[in-house]
Amino acid sequence: MCIEKDGSIHEDTFNNVVDLAVYLIRERGFPNVFFTHKEVVGWKECPLPWIKTPGEYERFKQAVNSKLNPLKEEVVTEDEDDMNKVLDYAQWTWNELDKYIGDAYNDKIIDEWAWVEKVRKKKLTYGELLMLKVLIDERRRKKG
């Protein structure tokens, strides 16, 4: 997303990103869960306007939910924890994830078969996937 000179996100850009997210969820089977770059890697202040103003990030997620469920008013509480929700992926995505985790196991990057089983049973949570991705990528980087 491009930002304005004052560091904000233009409303047209905001709306385009909402529309893109809705398309990816409806048409491509992406899960309705979002992470900022900072939430994934921990250090990158991206997207900066949403890091500086978390309410705008929440507004984005609510706008996506409103477009996905126009008749359902979404009530989000601070107690809800997206990281503990089981992934809701299309089958092709589970197949790709099975290959990714399976390859890491076969390459001895991870040594617990339970992770492969969790993927095959479609029981992996968002938080577990995030942790595995960081762990596998970091171990492959160090190994290579």
Image (tube, rainbow, N blue to C red):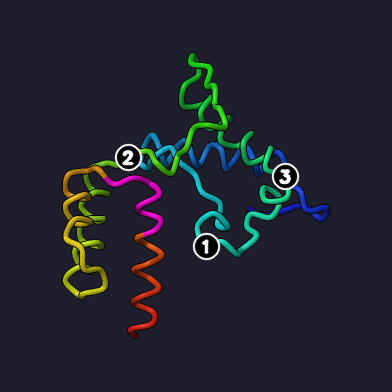
Mark 2 vs mark 3, foreground winner is 2
Q: Which residues are magenta?
A: 124-131
- In the picture, measured across the screen, residue 104 lies left or right of residue 6, that is left
**Residue under the point 56% across and 51% down:** 36
**126 drawn magenta:** yes
| Nearest the eye: 55 or 28 | 55
Q: Earlier in the sequence, mark 1 or mark 3?
A: 1
Identity of the residue drawn at 49% across and 14% down: 71
**Mark 2 residue crowding within 10 angstroms, few (<14) / some (14–19) / many (20+):** some
Q: Which residue is mark 1?
A: 41
- Residue at numbered disc 2: 86
Q: Give the percent coordinates (x, y) of residue 50.
A: 67, 47
Q: Within the magenta stretch, is there residue 118? A: no
User: Of the residues shown, which amino acid type is indicated by label 1?
Assistant: Val
Label 1–label 3 contact, CB within 8 A:
no
Amino acid type at mark 3 = Thr
Q: Is residue 5 left or right of residue 1?
A: right
Q: Residue furthest bottom?
A: 144
Q: Secondary structure at mark 1?
A: helix
Q: Amino acid at mark 2?
A: Val
Instruction: Name the residue beneath numbered marker 3.
Output: 53
Q: Are marks 2 and 3 in contact (CB under 8 Å)?
A: no
Earlier-in-chain disc, 2 versus 3: 3
C-alpha separation, residue under disc 1 versus residue under disc 3 = 19 Å
- Residue at image coords 21%, 74%: 108
State whether the magenta stretch is mostly helix, strand or loop: helix
Disc 2/disc 1 C-alpha distance (Å)? 21 Å
